[in-house]
Each structure stands twice: as structure tokens, then as C-alpha cells.
Amino acid sequence: MSYNLQMKKCEEYIAANLGKMITAGELAALCGYSLYHFCRVFKAFFNISPAEYIRKLKLKNAAEDIVNGKDVLNTALEYGYETHAGFTKAFLKEYGISPTNYKKLIKTGGVIMNYQIKNVDAFKVFGYLIEADYEKGGAFWKNIDFSKYPKYPENCDDQGEVAMWIHPEEVSGELKYFFGYKTSDSEVPEGFSEIIIPAAKYAVFEVDKAESAEELANIIESAWKQIFSEWFENNEYKYDENNICSEFYKDDNAYIYVPVV
């Protein structure tokens, strides 16, 4: 039997038995593979371990049930969690928000963002330092006429682009906006500034794809608001005031990097 069919069998078995304890060994036996071979094939197909796949699917289905009116405790028990607290902790880790607040957010048209906690090495960016009005908030790039600034060197933005408000000078307290590209180059192009972003721990939020720049800007602005009004309120992490928030853009993907401790 082909790997595609065996992995499809696994998906169906997991979906039908989410309320039970499912082990990788059980799934390997279902497919007729050794545990080692099964785990390698599963990771190749789904890019996560069997346990992580099962955990995410349980929480996804639980979230849908809660939004549709099911009681949080009964939902937790249905998906194999022994306590309300254990389920809430797992839910917070996955979605950055409590089950109750998740329901409120979805009912009012809010957006839940996928995120990961990552330790990011120091990196370098070249770009434009722009006098700007901080009150205009996230996705400030939408207000900038980039034709007034020097053009990027050819193929320089292969590693992605970065947008951020940098720390103010001590005397004036004025913030500056930076927009540029991540780079490994040593020579700063004429008309550009160089900034070294120090190594730090970040909550990295994946932003929904958009059909246009205007729509992306609106999503980014809503995401920033949600991070500080909801995510930090319902999460164990605290904002790291010694490091810099940023937006990261590469190809059609957008992310928000928030330093945390």
C-alpha cells in the first residue's frame, strides 16, 4: 500500500479517536511499519511529530466546539484533558488566548494568529530611517512614498524586508521609523542606514495572507492591537522592553516579531 494511503488512514483513525489516548506505536502498527520508519514517514508528510499533530487537531476541534456553544469543561473532558486548568493551559499555548476569550473574539469578528516562541540570532538590516508620526501605528509603510528614497540594490531583499520603530534618542525622545532589508553584506549602500538587531527571544506571529497591500496593512494593524490587548493579557510571556518589535515580510508571507521574556 502506498505511503499516501497509509497516511490518509492515519488521519482518519486519529480524527475518529481524538477522545482517546493515541500513541505513535499504535499508529505505526496500524500502518504495518516499524516505529522508526513510521515516525520518519509521518514527519515527512506532516512536518510535525504524531503527538504534535494529535495535540493540534484536538485543540482545533475543541476551539470549534466552544465557539459553537459547548461548555469548556465538557469539551476538555471530551478531548482527553483531565482538568479545566490543564486544557486552558494547552489552549493558551496554542492560541495565545483563553478558550472563553477565544469564543468572544471569534464571535465579534476577531482574528486568531498562529505564533511560535523563537530564539533569534542577531542580524543586520540596511534601509531607510524615516521621520514619522508614531501614532499612525503598525504597517506605517503604507504611508510612505518610497520613490523619494534610493532604490534597493538588485536582488538585495532575498532574505526578506523588515519594518520597525527604533528606540528613541535619549535627548529628544523622538521615534524614527525604519524600513529596509535583512542582509549579510558588509558595505552599506549610499543613502541607506545600518542597524544590528540583537539576539533575543520573540513571539513570532504569522499574519493572514491578503489580496492587496491595503488589506495587508489593515490586517497588520488589527494584529498589533490584538497582541497587546489580548495575547499579553492571557499569556505567561511578558514584553521585553530592551528589544525591538518588528514586522517581517518575505514573498507573500508576513510576520510580527515581538520580543518576550
Image (spheres, helix red, strand yellow):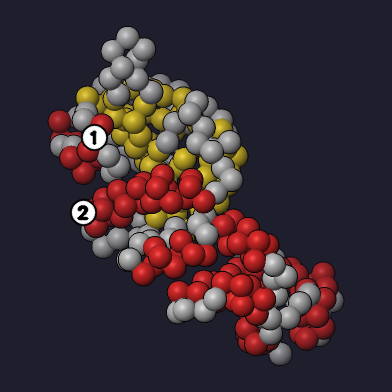
Q: Which residue is mark 1?
A: 135
x, y percentage for residue 210? Answer: 30, 60
Q: Residues within 10 Å of mark 2 (few under 14, many from 20)?
A: few
Residue at screen point 54% across, 76% down: 71
**Up-down: is 93 above or below 69?**
above
| 188 relative to 205 in the view: left or right | left
Q: Quadrant of the C terminus?
A: top right
Q: In what element is the residue under mark 2? A: helix
Residue closest to the eye, 153 or 46: 46
**Up-down: is 108 above or below 257?**
below
Residue at screen point 21% across, 30% down: 133
Residue at screen point 69% across, 71% down: 81
Total count of labels: 2
* Kind of residue at disc 2: Glu
Q: Earlier in the sequence, mark 1 or mark 2?
A: 1
Residue closest to the eye, 145 or 258: 258
* Kind of residue at disc 1: Glu
Tell me if residue 64 can be seen: no
